Amino acid sequence: MRPFMRKTRVGILGCANIAEKYAIAAFRSLPQVELVAIGSRKKAKAEEWAARHRLEAETYDSLIARKDIDIMYSPLPVGLQEEWTLKAAAAGKHVVCEKSITYSLQSAERMVDAFKKNGLALYENFVPEFHPQHAQVLALINKQKIGIPHVWNGAYGFPPFPKGDIRFRAELRGGALNDCGCYTVFMARKIMQQEPVAVTCALSNDEAEVDVKGSALLEFENGEALMSFGFDHLYQNTYSVWGSKGMVRTNRAFAVPPSMAPTVELITNDGREEKCDMIDVPAANQFALSFDFFCKAVATNERGQFEDMYERILHQASVLEAMRVSARERRRVEL
């Protein structure tokens, strides 16, 4: 790969916990990237964060208007992503958004169209895609270690969040499907290596009509995926794939701290005895790996990768939209 002429410069659009917990350190670990500034609706809050993290402070608008920034990282709530990413596209900025990138298929289409027209990259930051444990799972499946993969089964959920948490705010498009259920959908599609042909979904809403838990069945041409997710659960963060000759499962699938070395378990049975192999996977910073991929695509202007990013967004949004329709109308929805 040719050396970059200069570092890719990044601004953070919003003072979100995920930025402080993971993203800032991940960007700073990349030698070809310079993290420059952070913006908030209230300049005083941006100044507080900027002082803490050695950044420059801006408002959302002034950050987007800066000519010396190439990429915006947006950890904004789901309901604010479209407004501010469209402003970023109009200003010529590439954007990486935290998941879920938006709240509907139509919104995702508007966002993708704007970035396409401007020749810019738009990326939905599903960081688990880059963790090496999932490559290990896929390798076991593709080597037919579990035979024919019939069922992907995943769970991602948390104990209750405090009242007033943004995940419970309807106007910000909060909810379990957009926050944690989306991970199970994304990973089921990735590991089954297919797009679903039909979905059936049930969502349970609170008094503000925000979904706080749910479950779904995704039907594929070959196999299916079962998933559960929510905000009022014993913590679960795992998936398995059940095949004709065995099973592979993870012990920490979606949120994985950079220092944690997860384990992949392979269970097989040859008809005589059951065998269980524990496969250690090295620790990895999945945020840094995801940002590295995106920043390099931007720096080298890889238009083919931009197109792949658009399609990736729309495929995911299509499935989530079908799940919302299924839950609302209480029926199976074909894609």
Image (cartoon, rainbow, N blue to C red):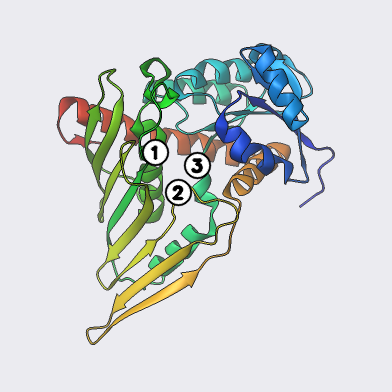
- Residue located at (42% from left, 33% from top): 314
Q: CA distance from mark 3 to mark 2?
A: 9 Å
Mark 3 element type? loop
Q: Quadrant of residue 270?
A: bottom left
- The kind of residue tagged 3 is Phe
- Residue located at (57% from left, 24% from top): 115
Q: Give the quarter of the figure containing the C terminus.
A: top left
Question: How many discs appear?
Answer: 3
Foreground residue among 320 and 90: 320
Q: Is residue 58 left or right of residue 14?
A: right
Residue 19 percent coordinates (x, y)? 61, 33
Where is mark 2, residue-wise? 254
- The kind of residue tagged 1 is Cys
* Among the two numbered marks 1 and 3 on one chain, the one whose residue lies closer to the N terminus: 3
Residue 133 percent coordinates (x, y)? 49, 60
| Mark 2 in CB contact with mark 1 (< 8 angstroms) | yes
Where is mark 1, residue-wise? 180
* Among the two numbered marks 2 and 1 on one chain, the one whose residue lies closer to the N terminus: 1
Q: Quadrant of residue 18?
A: top right
Query: Is residue 322 among the parts visible in the rendering?
Result: no
